[in-house]
Amino acid sequence: MKRLPTNPDVIVVGAGAAGLSAAKALQGRGFEVLVLEADDHVGGRCITDTSTFSTPFDRGGSWMHCAPINPLARLAEQAGDKLHKAPWDVTWAYADGQSLTEAEVAEYSLYQDQMWDEINKAGQGQKDVTVEAALPASRWKDTAKQWTTQMHAADADVTSAADVSRFEDAEGDWLVEGGLGAFIKRHHGDVAVRLNCPVTRIDYSGAGVLVETHQGTVSAGHVVVTVSTGVLAAENIQFHPALPAAKRSALEQLPMGLLNKVGFEFDPAWAAAHQGQLLDYGTGGDEFCTILFGFYETPLAVGFLAGRFADQVEAEGEGAASDYCLGALRDLFGADIDKSIRISSETAWRGCQHALGSYSYALPHGAGAREVLGQSIDEKIFFAGEATIPSAYATVHGAYQSGLKVAADIAAIAG
Ligand SMILES: Cc1cc2nc3c(=O)[nH]c(=O)nc-3n(C[C@H](O)[C@H](O)[C@H](O)COP(=O)(O)OP(=O)(O)OC[C@H]3O[C@@H](n4cnc5c(N)ncnc54)[C@H](O)[C@@H]3O)c2cc1C
């Protein structure tokens, strides 16, 4: 095993979108950077699986959300990557075992638009409320609110409307050919990463920082911590001195939600659904999934389960999420659908020890916690990652931007 380099300028903990962008930007400014990654791959929660299906499958982040204001979308355009820009619309909806008519689907979709307007309005009010409290009364409310659960990876009754209203949205969700994880990896190909090297302790009691791993201890002037709020809250990394109380309280306000995916590859001859079509399927209470068809204009469909229901299903064990989505597909297309499914695969992000969930959400009154989490300590420890960006949390582009921001902050101090 190669020895860890001695005394780099900056150590970056984690090689997800935030860590990679911080490292690349710092390298570009002439800093010597060491990136330490616990897992056996780069990309973190943005990872493309190229071995399960004949189409690349992003197990985490896949869309370049908010495309008009997404810097990754600009990079993809400059690189000449093929982009899939067509939107998905609700084509079919099942609520409590009943299939909605076309007219009902249209009403339901309209309610969804109104619902987001009301959440944003409520979020800008004086007093923070839950997303649930902001939802307008309607027969569609209980089904449509499951979309907020999917977006925030947490149920409407625990999510801050103020936090949601600070997210800077823009219409356009694009997919990049080959997968977003592969794109992030490609764009940061010049960043060297030490894989399988979890950081266990960060000591910032002295002049610089001492970063401990099982492969040894390295010192540096600064450290950039990009691990998820789940990993920080679980204290997988010990800090000496302990993190300040404000930082610990911010972590409590920003738990990890859960969004899991189920990929289904259909026989290419199967043509009952295509790119742009989407099924919403609820079986009562929080039991809900959405299935989107025709990723990259191929026979790959992806189902999504979120919030408490996703936790319950993940706890049931491997196969439970696939079974639930399969039930939805059977109800829509008939039991014969099984014959057209070549292979399926599901994620289990709660159990992923290096993430401990999918992405952060803010508890009511916790909207300001993102700024607190993002503040540096003693100009030695810098924090980046999706949870630190109020305008783009829970996204890959937010993580990417947070990395650029800390790189600029460090350069300002060191320069
Ligand atoms: C199912 C799912 C779907 C999503 N869909 C989208 C989407 O379509 N579009 C979108 O924009 N976003 C999406 N997201 C969110 C997006 O993937 C994340 O916000 C983003 O990838 C987070 O990047 P990050 O760099 O902040 O964190 P991470 O990617 O988690 O990076 C942190 C890194 O730190 C490593 N690490 C952990 N502990 C240690 C340690 N002790 N020492 C060293 N390294 C450590 C981790 O292994 C990881 O590689 C989705 C996420 C999930 C899970």
Image (cartoon, rainbow, N blue to C red):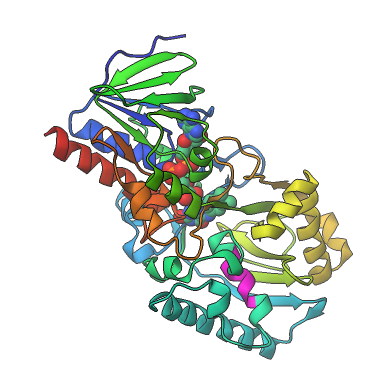
Most extreme residue toward the left is: 415
Extent of the magenta region: 144-149
Q: Is residue 158 left or right of residue 337?
A: left
Please state the horizontal and vertical placement of residue 78, each as a whole percent of the image.
29, 51
Q: Is residue 153 left or right of residue 124?
A: right
Task: Quadrant for residue 407, please give it.
Answer: top left
Of residue 367 and residue 111, the one placed in the foreground of this image is: 367
Q: Is 147 placed above or below 6 here?
A: below
Q: Is residue 28 left or right of residue 327?
A: left
Task: Quadrant for residue 370, please give it.
Answer: bottom left
**Magenta stretch: includes residue 138:** no
Q: Is 202 placed above or below 80 here?
A: above
Q: Is residue 108 left or right of residue 312?
A: left
Most extreme residue toward the bottom is: 103
Please state the horizontal and vertical placement of residue 116, each as a whole percent of the image.
49, 77
Please state the horizontal and vertical placement of residue 179, each as a whole percent of the image.
50, 48
* Dominant secondary structure of the residues highlighted in magenta in the image: helix
Quarter of the figure that contains the C terminus = top left
Task: Quadrant for residue 25, please give it.
Answer: top left
Most extreme residue toward the front is: 245
**Residue 4 at least partly seen:** yes
**Residue 81 at least partly seen:** no
x 87%, y 62%: residue:
336
x 50%, y 50%: residue:
252
x 38%, y 77%: residue:
126
The mark tally for this picture is: 0
Of residue 66 and residue 203, the one placed in the foreground of this image is: 203
**Magenta stretch: includes residue 145:** yes
Q: Is 392 placed above or below 351 here?
A: below
Please state the horizontal and vertical placement of residue 289, each as a whole percent of the image.
70, 64
